[in-house]
Amino acid sequence: MEISDIVAQAASEGRSILNEYEAKTVLKRHSIPTTEIKLARTLSEALKAAKEIGYPVVMKVVSPEITHKTDVGGVVLNIDSDEKLAEEYELMLKRVREAAGDVKILGVTVQEQVDRGVELMIGAIRDPQFGPVLALGIGGVFVEVYGDVAYRVAPVSRDDVLDMISELKGRKLLEGFRGLPPVDLEAVISMMLKISDMIIEHEEIAEMDLNPVIFRGSAGKVVDARVRIVA
C-alpha cells in the first residue's frame, strides 16, 4: 500500500493518527529501517506472525483511542514461545480493557524484539511559521523529563545533523556505554536525512514521533512510531 493510500484510508475513517503498523509501513517506503512488524486481529494470526518473525517478540495493542500503550498495559516484551504468547494475548487485552474502558481494539501488532542499544528520539513537525522542523534527542521514557533535544528547520544537511548531535548533553552515550559499541554517526545521519526528505515530500504528514530509535554500532531501527496526518 502506498503512502497516499494509507493516509487516505485513515482520513476516511476520521483518524488523524496512523496506527503503528501504518506508521512503520510509511517509514519503510522511504527506506527507513524499523522493527519487523505484523498486524494480527486474532490469536491465531498473532501466533502465525510470531512464527514468521521468530521468537522472542514484542506484542502491542492496536487501538485508535490509545496513544500511550504502555500506560494501559498494552505492551508485552520477551515473549519467547507460542504458549507465552497465547497467555499474554488474553492477559494484555484484559488489562487494556480494565485500564482504558470500552475502547475500540483493532487487534495487536507482533514485532521483533531488538537488542539493547542507545535510544534516540527523532521527530518532525510542520510548524505554521517555519515549515518542517526536525528534532533529535536522547530517547526512551525520559525524553520529556530531560528535554535533551536539538532542532533544525528542514531540509537538513549532513553537517546540520552533526551539529545537532554535538548539542546534545547526552551525546557521550553515542561513544559507547556500559559494554555497548560506539554508535556509527553515519547511521544516525542517514536516517535523519531520509526523514528530512520524507517530511518535505509528504505535506499530508503533520508530525512524526519516533521514540525510541535504537542504534547499536552501524545499525539503527525505529522501535516505536507515531505519525499524525494533516486533518
Image (spheres, rainbow, N blue to C red):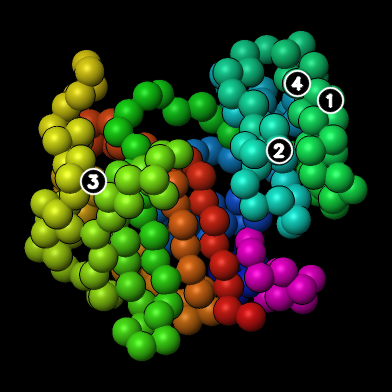
Which structural element holds mark 2?
helix
The residue identified by callout 2 is: 72
Question: Is residue 16 toward the left or the right of residue 165 in the image?
Answer: right
The residue identified by callout 4 is: 88
Q: Nearer the viewer, mark 2 or mark 4?
A: 2
Q: Residue at x 51, y 45 (%)?
A: 224
Can residue 55 be seen in this snapshot? no
Percent x, y of residue 39: 70, 43
Query: Callout 2, which amino acid?
Result: Val
Q: Quadrant of residue 181?
A: top left
Q: Nearer the viewer, mark 3 or mark 2?
A: 2
Q: Are marks 4 and 1 in contact (CB under 8 Å)?
A: yes
Of the 4 image quadrants, the one containing the C terminus is bottom right
Percent x, y of residue 106: 81, 48
Mark 3 Cα shell of 10 Å, populated few (<14), some (14-19), many (≥20): some
79 and 76: which one is in front? 76
Mark 4 Cα shell of 10 Å, populated few (<14), some (14-19), many (≥20): some
Which structural element holds mark 4?
helix
Q: Which mark is residue 187?
A: 3
Marks 2 and 4, Cα distance to the nearest angstrom?
14 Å
Query: Callout 1, which amino acid?
Result: Glu
The residue identified by callout 1 is: 90
Q: Residue at x 39, y 45 (%)?
A: 145
Upstream in sequence: badge 3 or badge 2: 2
174 and 13: which one is in front? 174
- Magenta residues, start to end: 8-18
Marks 4 and 3, Cα distance to the nearest angstrom?
35 Å
Marks 3 and 2, Cα distance to the nearest angstrom?
33 Å
Q: Residue at x 77, y 73 (%)?
A: 14
Can residue 6 be seen in this snapshot? yes
Marks 4 and 1, Cα distance to the nearest angstrom?
5 Å
